[in-house]
Image (cartoon, rainbow, N blue to C red):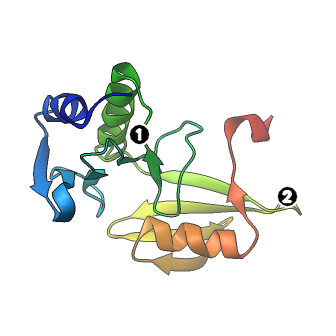
């Protein structure tokens, strides 16, 4: 396991991140140029080595908590660099966002980013509009939908 100082050095090597000291010696790092409302890339990096990286929009199978964060406590230098780079990229993409969700009845709804809102569509019909991605995703999860991955589409 990397020490707090080693993780801090790796994270600080990403010049696009801005450090924010928070309580109990913890540190957050924000990506101020994010095209999303979300700006926090590293959350509560603690002197004991624990911490989190935002990975909700990364196209990979990271074990996410309810906030879309991945625990980086046991990450190697390479793993930490890769997830931070992917997190920044996911918050930088300005291309239209579209993500399909499916339920047990194989109905598909789509989340899209349109201007400043997150919209859920059933085909061409607007099902709902949300202020954040998390709100739209929460709605879909509550309705029994899950993110449609590439392997699900085959």
Give the quarter of the figure containing the C terminus: top right
* Residue 39 image position (x, y, % from top left): 25, 56
What residue is pinned by disc 2? 106
Visible residue check, residue 125: no
Q: Nearer the N terminus, badge 2 or badge 1?
A: 1
Visible residue check, residue 117: yes
* Residue 3 image position (x, y, % from top left): 27, 31
At x 73% / y 64%, what residue is drawn? 145
Give the quarter of the figure containing the N terminus: top left
Q: Secondary structure at mark 2?
A: loop
At x 47% / y 41%, what residue is drawn? 58
* Residue 35 image position (x, y, % from top left): 26, 54
The outermost residue toward the right is 105
132 sits to left or right of 110: left
At x 39% / y 23%, what residue is drawn? 76
Q: Residues within 10 Å of mark 2 (few under 14, many from 20)?
A: few
| Front-most of residues 146 and 11 | 11
What residue is pinned by disc 1? 73
| Front-most of residues 48 and 33 | 48
* Residue 52 image position (x, y, % from top left): 37, 48
76 sits to left or right of 29: right
At x 45% / y 46%, what residue is drawn? 71
């Amino acid at each position: 396991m990397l020490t707090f100082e080693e993780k801090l050095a790796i994270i600080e090597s990403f010049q696009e991140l801005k450090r924010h000291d928070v309580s109990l010696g913890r540190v957050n790092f924000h990506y101020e140029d994010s095209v999303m409302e979300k700006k926090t890339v590293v959350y509560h990096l603690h002197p004991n080595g624990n911490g989190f990286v935002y990975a909700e929009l990364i196209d990979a199978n990271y074990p996410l908590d309810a906030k879309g964060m991945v625990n980086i406590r046991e990450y190697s230098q390479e793993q930490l660099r890769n997830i931070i780079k992917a997190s920044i990229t996911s918050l930088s993409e300005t291309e239209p966002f579209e993500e399909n969700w499916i339920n047990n009845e194989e109905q598909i709804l789509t989340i899209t980013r349109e201007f400043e809102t997150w919209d859920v569509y059933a085909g061409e019909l607007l099902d709902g509009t949300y202020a954040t991605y998390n709100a739209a995703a929460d709605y879909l999860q509550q309705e029994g939908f899950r993110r449609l991955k590439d392997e699900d589409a085959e």
